[in-house]
Image (spheres, grey):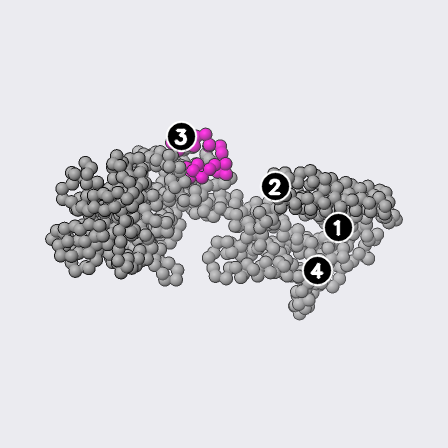
C-alpha cells in the first residue's frame, strides 16, 4: 500500500478572500485510516478532490510513497474515490457499476474481479440488487454501491467523501465496520471525511479537525478529545460539546460564572496578564456531588446551582445549568464566534450525569468537577493554555 | 362546494353548451358527409360536459378545463390537416367541396414528387438546413457547456440574448441580410442562405442543448476521471451515453425547424431556382401544374420528417420542449 503526504497545500479563493485550503500539511502512513472532520463548508471535499487530482492547488505538494504527484493526472495517481453524491452510471446496473473502475485498466482478472464484487456486495447488503439500475435504488443503497465500487478496486489509496452520510442510524454502524474491516484486512491506506464527530473518533486511526480550510489539529482520537490544541477542536469534538465559559483570573483563582477554581503556578504563569480566558469543561466531567462519581473526586472544583432543565437519555441525563455573563464579555465571545463562523458559547453549562439520580428542573444541585479536567483557552488565539 | 368542483362544473357547462351549439349548427347548416364530423365533435363535447357533471367531485386530479382545451386544440389542428389531405387527394379536375374527402386519388403526390421545381426546392431546403445545423451544433454545444458549467459573469444576460434571438421575428433581419448578400455578390446563391439560416438554427440549438447539458450527471465525469479513465474512455463511458441521445434529437429537431423556414428563403432568393421548399410552396404556386393539390401534397410530404421524429422520440422531445412546465 501507499503512504500519503501533503505539504503546505493551499488553494486561493477567487476575489482574494480567505483561502479555500489554508497551508494544509498531513501525513497518512501506509495501511492507516485518517478521518477529516469539520463542519459543512470546511473544505474537506475540496481537499479530497485535490488529492485525487480533480482540482489544482495554488501551492504546496502532494506525495504518494514519498514521490511528488502534484502535477500528475488522476489516472497516474490511481486513488479510488467515493463521492458525496454517489456519481453512479445511470445506464449500468449495480454489478457493472461495482466493476466499472476496475475494468478501466488493462490486464484485470475477470474471475477474481467477479468474486471480489460478490464478496463486497455481500458485505454491503447489495447481493440482491446486483441487477438493479441506480434509479431503482434508494439513497442509502446508492451510497453503498458507490462505496462498494471503491472497495472492489485495487488502488494506491482510498478517499471517501462522507461515505456513510445517507445510511440510517441502525445500518450506518454496520457499513462503517465492514468498510474499515475490509480496508484493514487488505492493508489499505484511507482518508475519509465526515461531519459526524463520533464517526470520526470511532472509525479512524487518526483524526484531523478541519474548519475554514485550515487543519486545527491532527492526532489520535483520544489525544484530540482529551488534549484539544485549541478552542475550536475542544468545542467541536464531543456530543454534547465541551462547555466553554468565560473565566477571569483573580490572583491565584480563576473565577467562572458558576464556580471558582484554584490555579497552580504553572497555569498561572501561562495565563500571564490576560484579563479574561475561556474555561472548557466536558459535560461528562461534571459529577453530582452526592453520587458515587462525585464523592470519588478529590482535587475538585465545586459549586451549587439551580437546574434549569433536564433531558433524560436512558444511559445518562443532561442537566442544563444556566448562568449570566456581562454584556462586555458577551461581546468578546460573539467576536470570537464571528471570526470562527461557529457557535461555541452558550449561556448554560451542560452536565452529563448518571441516569439513576432523580433530577428535576428547579431543584438545587451540587456539581463536582475534577480540577485537572478543566481546560483553559486564550480567547483570542484559541490556544489551549493547559497543555 | 370546493373551488375545483365549481371550476369543473363551469368547464362542463361550457363544454356542453359548446357541443350543443356545434351540433345544432351542424344539423341545420352543414350538408353530409361533413355533417357527421360536426355531430361527432358535438357528441364528444357534450359527453365531456356530462362526464364533468357526473365526476365533478372526483378526488382524482382531473382538469375538465384541460380536457376541453385538448379537444378544442385537436379540432383546430386536425381540421386544417384533414382539409389539406382532402385537397391533396381530390380527383383530377374536381374541386373539393366538403371537408371529408369524396374520392381519394394519389396522383397529386406523384406530381409533387415528380415536379422538378419542388424537387429542387426540397434539395435546397435540405442542403441549407443541413449545413446550418451542422455548423450550429458544435457552436451551440460549446455555448451550452459554457452556460451550464463555466462560472462566468454575464451568463444570464447572454442566455437571455439567445432566447431573445429565438423570439425575434426573422422577417426583421431579412432585409439587412439580403443587402449584405448583395454587397458581397452572393445574392441568389443557395449557399448564401446558410449564414442567414444560422439565425434560426444557432439560438434554437443552443437553447435545446442547454436543456440536454443541464440533465447530464456531471459528478460522474469527476468519478470517471478519478477512476483513472483515459480521454477515450471518458468519451466512451461518459460523453457518449450522457450526451449523444439528447444531442442527436436536438440536431434532428433543429434540422426540421430549419427545413420549415420560409421567411428567409423567400426574402433572400431572387428566383425559383434557389427557393427552399416552404418558400416555393408559398410563392411559386403558379409554376406548379394543378397547383393547389400538388402544393397540399408536397406540404403533407414535407411534414413527414417532423411526424417521424415525434413518433420515434416522443418522450425525449416532450422533455426537451416541455421541461419548464414540469
Mark 2 or mark 4, earlier in chain: 2
Q: Residue at x 70, y 44 (%)?
A: B12
- Label 2 to label 3: alpha-carbon separation: 43 Å
- Label 2 to label 4: alpha-carbon separation: 43 Å
Q: Which residue is mark 1?
A: B299
Q: Nearer the viewer, residue A285 or B139?
A: A285
- Label 1 to label 3: alpha-carbon separation: 62 Å
Q: Which residues are magenta?
A: A118-146
Mark 1 or mark 4, earlier in chain: 4
How crowded pointer 1 is (Cα within 10 Å; few <14, some 14-19, many 20+) is rated as many
Where is the N terminus of chain B found, in terms of image quarters? Answer: top right
Q: Nearer the viewer, residue B245 or B171?
A: B171
- Label 1 to label 4: alpha-carbon separation: 16 Å
Mark 3 or mark 4, whichever is nearer to me:
3
Q: Quadrant of residue B61?
A: top right
- Label 2 to label 1: alpha-carbon separation: 39 Å
Q: Are marks 3 and 4 on the same chain?
A: no
Q: Residue at x 46, y 32 (%)?
A: A130
Q: Is residue A121 magenta?
A: yes
Q: Are marks 1 and 3 on the same chain?
A: no
Q: Are marks 1 and 4 on the same chain?
A: yes
Amino acid at each position: 500500500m501507499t503512504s500519503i503526504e501533503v505539504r503546505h497545500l493551499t488553494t486561493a479563493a477567487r476575489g482574494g478572500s480567505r483561502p479555500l485550503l489554508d497551508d494544509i500539511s498531513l501525513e497518512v502512513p501506509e495501511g492507516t485510516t485518517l478521518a477529516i472532520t469539520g463542519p459543512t463548508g470546511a473544505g474537506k471535499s475540496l481537499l479530497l478532490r485535490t488529492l485525487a487530482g480533480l482540482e489544482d492547488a495554488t501551492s504546496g505538494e502532494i506525495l504518494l510513497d514519498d514521490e511528488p504527484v502534484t502535477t500528475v493526472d488522476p489516472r497516474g495517481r490511481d486513488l479510488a474515490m467515493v463521492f458525496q453524491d454517489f456519481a453512479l452510471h445511470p445506464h449500468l446496473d449495480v454489478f457493472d457499476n461495482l466493476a466499472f473502475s476496475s475494468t478501466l485498466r488493462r490486464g484485470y482478472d475477470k474471475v477474481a474481479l467477479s468474486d471480489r464484487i460478490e464478496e463486497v456486495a455481500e458485505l454491503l447488503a447489495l447481493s440482491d440488487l446486483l441487477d438493479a439500475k441506480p434509479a431503482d435504488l434508494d439513497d442509502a443503497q446508492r451510497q453503498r454501491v458507490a462505496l462498494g465500487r471503491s472497495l472492489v478496486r485495487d488502488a494506491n489509496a482510498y478517499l471517501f467523501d462522507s461515505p456513510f452520510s445517507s445510511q440510517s442510524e441502525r445500518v450506518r454502524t454496520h457499513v462503517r465496520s465492514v468498510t474499515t474491516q475490509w480496508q484493514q484486512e487488505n492493508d489499505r491506506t484511507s482518508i475519509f471525511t465526515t461531519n459526524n464527530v463520533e464517526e470520526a473518533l470511532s472509525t479512524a486511526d487518526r483524526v484531523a479537525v478541519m474548519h475554514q480550510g485550515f487543519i486545527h489539529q491532527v492526532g489520535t482520537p483520544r489525544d484530540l478529545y482529551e488534549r484539544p490544541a485549541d478552542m475550536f477542536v475542544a468545542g467541536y469534538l464531543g456530543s454534547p460539546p465541551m462547555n466553554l465559559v468565560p473565566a477571569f483570573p483573580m490572583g491565584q483563582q480563576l473565577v467562572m460564572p458558576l464556580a471558582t477554581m484554584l490555579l497552580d503556578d504553572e497555569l498561572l504563569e501561562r495565563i500571564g496578564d490576560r484579563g479574561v480566558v475561556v474555561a472548557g469543561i466536558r459535560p461528562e466531567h461534571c459529577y453530582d456531588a452526592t453520587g458515587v462519581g462525585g464523592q470519588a473526586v478529590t482535587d475538585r472544583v465545586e459549586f451549587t446551582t439551580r437546574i434549569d432543565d433536564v433531558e433524560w437519555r436512558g444511559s445518562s441525563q443532561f442537566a442544563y445549568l444556566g448562568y449570566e455573563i456581562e454584556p462586555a464579555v458577551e461581546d468578546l465571545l460573539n467576536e470570537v464566534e464571528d471570526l470562527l463562523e461557529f457557535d461555541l458559547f452558550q449561556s448554560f453549562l451542560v452536565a452529563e450525569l448518571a441516569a439513576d439520580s432523580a433530577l428535576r428542573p428547579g431543584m438545587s444541585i451540587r456539581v463536582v468537577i475534577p480540577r485537572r479536567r478543566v481546560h483553559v483557552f486564550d480567547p483570542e488565539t484559541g490556544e489551549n493554555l493547559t497543555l | 362546494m370546493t373551488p375545483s368542483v365549481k371550476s369543473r362544473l363551469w368547464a362542463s357547462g361550457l363544454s356542453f353548451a359548446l357541443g350543443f351549439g356545434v351540433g345544432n349548427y351542424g344539423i341545420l347548416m352543414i350538408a353530409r358527409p361533413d355533417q357527421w364530423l360536426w355531430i361527432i365533435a358535438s357528441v364528444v363535447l357534450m359527453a365531456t360536459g356530462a362526464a364533468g357533471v357526473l365526476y365533478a367531485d372526483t378526488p382524482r386530479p382531473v382538469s375538465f378545463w384541460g380536457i376541453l382545451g385538448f379537444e378544442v386544440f385537436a379540432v383546430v389542428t386536425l381540421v386544417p390537416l384533414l382539409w389539406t389531405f382532402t385537397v391533396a387527394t381530390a380527383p383530377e379536375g374536381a374541386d373539393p367541396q366538403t371537408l371529408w374527402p369524396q374520392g381519394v386519388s394519389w396522383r397529386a403526390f406523384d406530381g409533387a414528387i415528380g415536379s422538378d421545381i419542388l424537387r429542387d426546392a426540397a434539395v435546397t431546403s435540405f442542403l441549407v438546413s443541413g449545413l446550418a445545423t451542422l455548423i450550429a451544433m458544435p457552436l451551440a454545444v460549446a455555448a451550452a457547456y459554457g452556460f451550464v458549467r463555466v462560472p462566468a459573469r454575464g451568463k444570464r444576460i447572454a442566455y437571455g440574448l439567445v432566447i431573445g434571438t429565438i423570439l425575434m421575428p426573422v422577417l426583421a433581419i431579412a432585409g439587412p441580410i439580403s443587402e449584405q448578400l448583395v454587397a458581397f455578390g452572393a445574392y441568389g446563391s443557395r449557399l448564401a442562405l446558410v449564414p442567414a439560416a444560422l439565425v434560426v438554427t444557432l439560438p434554437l440549438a443552443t437553447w435545446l442543448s442547454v436543456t440536454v447539458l443541464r440533465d447530464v450527471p456531471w459528478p460522474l465525469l469527476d468519478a470517471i476521471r478519478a477512476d483513472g479513465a483515459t480521454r477515450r474512455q471518458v468519451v466512451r463511458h461518459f460523453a457518449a451515453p450522457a450526451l449523444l441521445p439528447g444531442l442527436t434529437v436536438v440536431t434532428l429537431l433543429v434540422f426540421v425547424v430549419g427545413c420549415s423556414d420560409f421567411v428567409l428563403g423567400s426574402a433572400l432568393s431572387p428566383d425559383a431556382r434557389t427557393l427552399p421548399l416552404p418558400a416555393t410552396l408559398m410563392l411559386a404556386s403558379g409554376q406548379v401544374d394543378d397547383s393547389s393539390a400538388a402544393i397540399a401534397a408536397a406540404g403533407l410530404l414535407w411534414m413527414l420528417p417532423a411526424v417521424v421524429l415525434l413518433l420515434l422520440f416522443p418522450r425525449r422531445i416532450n422533455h426537451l420542449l416541455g421541461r419548464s412546465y414540469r
